[in-house]
């Protein structure tokens, strides 16, 4: 079920990013990383919310029954001055936002603008 769930979520993410300057990839077993270039914090939040709502509507076969209980916890980090921020700091801040979303009950977006 995990692979199928990841495949479905990847499809939702792909459908929400049409610009050639945007990048999405699998970060680890259960997480995706998306980079939106030239995007405002508000624009990133709208996109994140569209993804969250679209994933929530997905259906997957579980124990022989179709269920639509798929949710995502999203960390939305907007960086205004990329040159002054290390990759390690970006990843740590992103991970912290995801942890916050999960700790707050999941199926939500935690955001920060730097």
Image (spheres, rainbow, N blue to C red):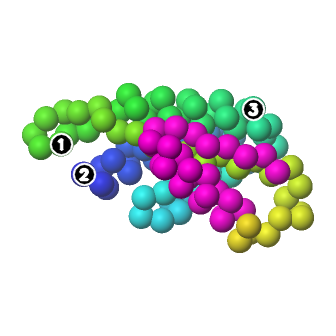
Numbered marks: total: 3
Secondary structure, mark 3, is helix
Callout 3 crowding tier (Cα within 10 Å): few <14, some 14–19, many ≥20: few
Seen from the viewer's position, the closer of residues 15 and 45 is 45
From the image, tell me which residue sits under label 2: 1
Residue 81 placement, left or right of 16: right
Q: CA distance from mark 3 to mark 2?
A: 33 Å
> x and y percent of residue 14 in the render?
53, 42
> x and y percent of residue 64 in the render?
10, 40
Secondary structure, mark 1, is strand
Secondary structure, mark 2, is loop
Q: Is residue 12 visible?
A: no
Q: Which residues are magenta?
A: 90-114
From the image, tell me which residue sits under label 1: 62
Question: What is the number of the mark on residue 42?
Answer: 3
- 73 lies above or below 47: below
Question: Image point 40% across, 39% down: which residue?
Answer: 71
Q: Is residue 39 magenta?
A: no
Looking at the image, tell me whether mark 2 or mark 1 is earlier in sequence order.
2
- Contact? badges 2 and 1 (CB < 8 Å): yes
Question: What is the number of the mark on residue 37?
Answer: none
Q: Is residue 105 magenta?
A: yes
């Amino acid at each position: 079920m995990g692979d199928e769930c990841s495949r479905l979520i990847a499809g939702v993410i792909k459908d929400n990013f049409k610009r050639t300057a945007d990048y999405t990839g699998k970060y680890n077993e259960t997480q995706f990383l998306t980079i939106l270039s030239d995007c405002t914090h508000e624009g990133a939040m709208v996109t994140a919310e569209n993804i969250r709502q679209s994933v929530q509507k997905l259906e997957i076969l579980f124990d022989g029954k179709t269920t639509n209980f798929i949710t995502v916890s999203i960390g939305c980090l907007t960086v205004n001055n990329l040159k002054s921020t290390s990759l390690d700091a970006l990843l740590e801040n992103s991970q912290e936002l995801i942890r916050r979303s999960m700790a707050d009950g999941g199926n939500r977006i935690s955001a920060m603008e730097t």
